[in-house]
Image (cartoon, grey):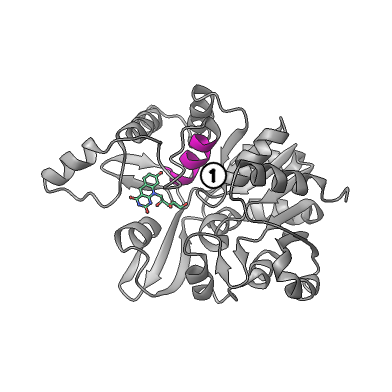
Amino acid sequence: MIVILAGGTGSVKLVRGLAKITDDLSVISNVGDNIWFYGLYICPDIDTVTYGLAGILDEKRGWGVKDDTFFFLDQLAKMGQSSWFSLGDRDLATHVVRTSMMQSGKSLVEITDWMREKLAVRPRIIPATNNQVETRIQTDKGEMHLQEFWVKEKGLPSVTAVRYKGAKEAEPSTEAIDAIRKADKIIIAPANPVSSIGPIVALDGIRKELSKVRSRVVAVSPLIGQSAVSGPAVKYMKAAGLRSSPVGVAEFYRDFVGSMVISETDHEMAGQIRELGMQVYETNITMSDRQDEVRLGQYLLNIGSL
Ligand code: FO1
């Protein structure tokens, strides 16, 4: 069984590639991006992966449903309501159904599993926890929810720190812990280490479980050189006191990751990563099309048997 720890936009390509080559895949999903908006519970990373695997993701944006319309949002704006978070009309159905199921007592794990079945998605998608954990960004404009920073403020304020509200009290989902225990290999997607993977490994139980099987945990660098493949990783990493390079990612992961996969163009960093007690693998980690996604997925499955 293969497990992948995943965020949203930065992770979905590899999740899709792996889903094409293994029948037994479990995705442990970040919940730190989740946000309440107009009484609805939105889970961007869970939804991005679910939509990606269901073939209905808006791939240009990297989130939301393809060919969606935004009449609901337009109407909100006409009524003078805040409309900075673009909820599409089709996407809205997911949030309405999820919130209504939550109100009738279902857990996020149960709802997510029900949804992926409804959308004919084969891999399991497991929220890291049923509890609410919120990634909060401290900036020169005050502390705010990650979505407020990234979407409303367009990622512009300077970031001084990142914290995971609720992570200390949160219990990891038993399904996530079970998946890690049973996994032959655990992959960490090339996602934002601080905002996508950080909230998952901030859960004590998950971090401990990963540390126990460290030699089976393989992380793909989300950075090539000093730059993130996508998103605000560099900004968050600097605020967390990390170097913005694959070495910084490795330092962040060193307690629970045994192997790092980096771009072959970052060959000169391999030695520094090995000094952290990790194995290093170098390959082309860019995923520009479906073939790349499968190629990188296959490369990761071969690690250990290389
Ligand atoms: N990202 C944006 O940049 N602007 C948006 O208006 C926006 C809306 C949105 C709605 C639903 C959803 O599932 C995701 C959405 N995202 C939007 C993406 C999201 O902000 C982040 O990229 C992820 O949370 C990071 O993984």
- Residue 98 locus on image (x, y percent): 40, 32
Q: Which amino acid does label 1 sit on?
A: Thr
Secondary structure of residue under mark 1: loop
Q: Residue at x 69, y 67 (%)?
A: 250
Q: In this view, does 212 lie to the left or right of 200?
A: right
State whether residue 1 is above or below residue 259: above
Q: Which residue range is magenta in the image?
A: 43-52
Asked if the stretch drawn in magenta spans residue 274, the answer is no
Is any atom of residue 125 visible in this view? Answer: yes
Q: Residue at x 25, y 42 (%)?
A: 38
State whether residue 4 is above or below residue 153: above
Q: Is residue 1 left or right of residue 234?
A: right
- Residue 42 locus on image (x, y percent): 38, 42
- Position of the N terminus, as image quadrant, is top right
Asked if the stretch drawn in magenta spans residue 46, the answer is yes
Q: Is residue 107 left or right of residue 216?
A: left
- Residue 300 locus on image (x, y percent): 75, 48
Helix, strand or loop for the magenta stretch, by majority = helix
- Residue 187 locus on image (x, y percent): 70, 49
